[in-house]
Each structure stands twice: as C-alpha cells, then as structure tokens.
Amino acid sequence: MGGRSSRRDFLGAIGLGLSVVSAGCNTLEAQPDRQQPNWSVELDGMPARARSVSDHGLILATTLTPDGELGHLRFSGDYERLADLSRITTAPVVYDGRAFVESDGTIRSIPIDGGDPVRMHSGYLALGRYEPVVSESQLFGIGYNNEFEKYTVFAIDLEAERVRWIRPFGSMQASIATDGDHVFAASPSGIVRAYSANDGATIWKTHVGGDARLTYHDGTVFVATNRGLVALDSTDGTHLWLAESHWIASVSAVPAVADSTVYTLLTLYSTHHRNMFATETYLVAYHASGAERWRTRVNYGTPLTVTEDAIGVETMEEVETDRGNRRLKRYLSVFATGGKRLVKYDLPDRSTMRPLIRDNSVIVGYGNTVASYER
C-alpha cells in the first residue's frame, strides 16, 4: 500500500494466546475464540494513541512523544501513515475528509486521502488534554495560548481553517462540550461557564465543586465533581439536581451519556478514611434524574466508551497465579447498559486509547498495539 510506514509490522489474524481468568463465567469460557484478535497492528515506539473515527477506519496519532505520526488504520487492519508529527497533545479531529491535529503548539490540516499537512494561521495554540468538539463546521477547544499566557477557550472555522474567536479561561486544562449554540467549559477548580458559540461571549457561569468535568446531552449539562454528579440547565446554568457523595476522592474521566443514563468514573475513598492510598475507582451509572442505577470497579484513569447498547472500559481483577499468589490483572470489559458484563478481553498491557465498539467488533489499544476482537 502506498505511503505505508516501513517502520511498522502488520500482524493479521494472529493468536496471542490470551486467556481469560474468571470465576464462574461460563459464557466467556464457552467462547474462547473471542480472545484471539481478528487482526492486530504493532506500532514501534508509540507509547500512546488518540483516535478519531472516519468512514473507513480510525485516525490514530501518537501523543506526547517527540517522534510521532498521524496514521489511518482501516477496519480491515491495514495501516497507512499520513504524516510525521511531534508532540501531539490530544486526539485528531476528522471533518470533511481532513484530520485536524495540533503538533508542537501549531494546528495542522492533513487530507485523509493523501497530501501534505497545511499549517493553520492560529499562532501557538495547543489543544490541551481533552478532545475538542465539533459542531457543523466549528471546532471548539481549550488549550494553552502564548499570546494570553494561559489556557483559553477558542472556536476554529474548519472550512476557512482559521480561528474565529478566542477567550481567556484560566491556568489549567479543562473539559468542553457544545449544543451548537453554546460552548460549555468546566475548570478543575469547579467553575462551569457557557459561551456563545457565535462570538464567545459569556452567557452564564456557576460553581459546582472541584475536579469538575462535563458533558452535554438533550438540554442538560452533566458535571462530575468531587461532590457528586451535578445536572445544570444548559440555557441559564440553573442547578437541576445533585447526586451527592461525601466519599469521592477524584473524578477519573469526562462523563458520557447514552439514552437516559449518565456514566461517570469516580475514585472513592475505600476505608471510610480520607486516605488517598486507600481508594477504589468505579464506573457509576446514574439515571438522568440523578438516581444511581449500578456501579462496577474499574482501573483508575481508564479510557471509557459509551454507545447506545454497550459500555467499554478497562477493568482490574485480582486473580490467582500458578504459585498460589494473588495479583491484579487488566481486562477490557464490555458491559450492557444494565450493568451486566457481556465479554472481557485479556490486556497484556495498559490501555492507551478509548476502545471502539463497532458492529460486531471491539477495537482496543494497549501498549504499542491496536487489535480488533470479535464482540
């Protein structure tokens, strides 16, 4: 394939000998073929990946590494390098056949079907830790800007490939969401602001609690904080309800919404003593009214993917070794929306990207490998 990186090994339909260690899980034991990937691609020297979905595959980027690249991994397992880039800080964004990605503080546009990167006239504008969001032809993000010497909220016109507006935000990275008319941003200090998507004017702001991370769904802004899950009216910031907890040590990821359920990753004090060395992280499912539906223990800082009928997340379980010792083992688990685990895949290394649940397959990234498994 033209443009394919010569530094990569492409492994198709291999047997990694992955095993499931599970007590009383007859469904998994009856289907061991699910532990064999349909295909896998091993990437040399790439400690982390971020991904965005195109019509035919994933747009992958190495992050936070001097020697990196942007690539197109098709759902068949074929990989094509698109560009050599360094120090990418967040996932690329796909729009109208182009991938937009920040490298060394400069935003670049790269055609997916081939072509050289085009540097946008954005000055030094990093996209920050969290993925930006796109509404129609507008990209909204939060990242450091050297003109303001602090983090900013900004809008980029993806058709004109230029910054539309930019506003000072604060000194720390933050999460962002949009409903098309408003841009919502939550700072770790607990301030949530709503901006006009048209010109960046501040519409409302409110305080919700520390370590705040937000998402938007159907007229409501849901914010996970160290006080609990908060629901805000998107038009004026009115507090609708608070699912309060006094035992939240930290918020581990941006929440996600599907149907009438909000999913959050919360790290809780586990011994009823406020000791950061005695905490456990859970995936907690809340009804959109604020009532908790279910929870299950997961790995701290795990990537989270939510679809209409499934949740993919990295879990940790204590298993017994051949020598009779106990140790923690990593899995990529897929849960039904009611909380039942449908399948789990043995992970040889730590997850490095959000899993993709697509049709009858689950695509996961661990260590330097991206692999596709039967769902």
Image (tube, rainbow, N blue to C red):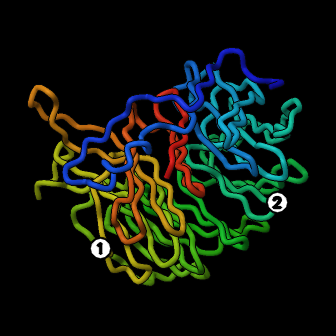
Residue 178 sits above or below residue 366 on the image:
below
Report the amino acid beneath label 2: Ser
Question: Depth check: 164 or 282 in front?
Answer: 282
Observer able to see residue 146: no
How far from the left and from the top, in percent, is residue 145? 67, 42
* Residue at the image position 60 percent from the left and 36 percent from the top: 89
Whole-percent x, y for residue 201 in the image:
71, 68
Q: Residue at x 52, y 41 (%)?
A: 353
- Outermost front residue: 30
Residue in view at x 77 percent, y 30 percent: 82
| Location of residue 106 in the rendering, given as x and y in whole percent from the top left corner | 74, 34
Residue 263 is drawn in which quadrant? bottom left
* Left or right: 298, with 257 as reference point: left
What residue sits right under mark 2 in the picture?
A: 137
Disc 1 on helix, strand or loop?
A: strand
Is 163 located above or below residue 12 in the figure?
Answer: below
Residue 244 shows which numbered tag?
Answer: 1
In-image side of 130 versus 30 (left or right): right
The mark that comes first in sequence, 1 or 2, is 2
**329 to the left or right of 72:** left
In front: 286, or 214?
286
Q: Is residue 224 above or below residue 239?
A: above
Q: Whole-percent x and y of residue 105?
A: 69, 34
Judge by depth and name the residue closer to the eye, 196 or 65: 65
Instruction: Give how far apart the Cα atoms at labels 1 and 2 are.
Output: 37 Å
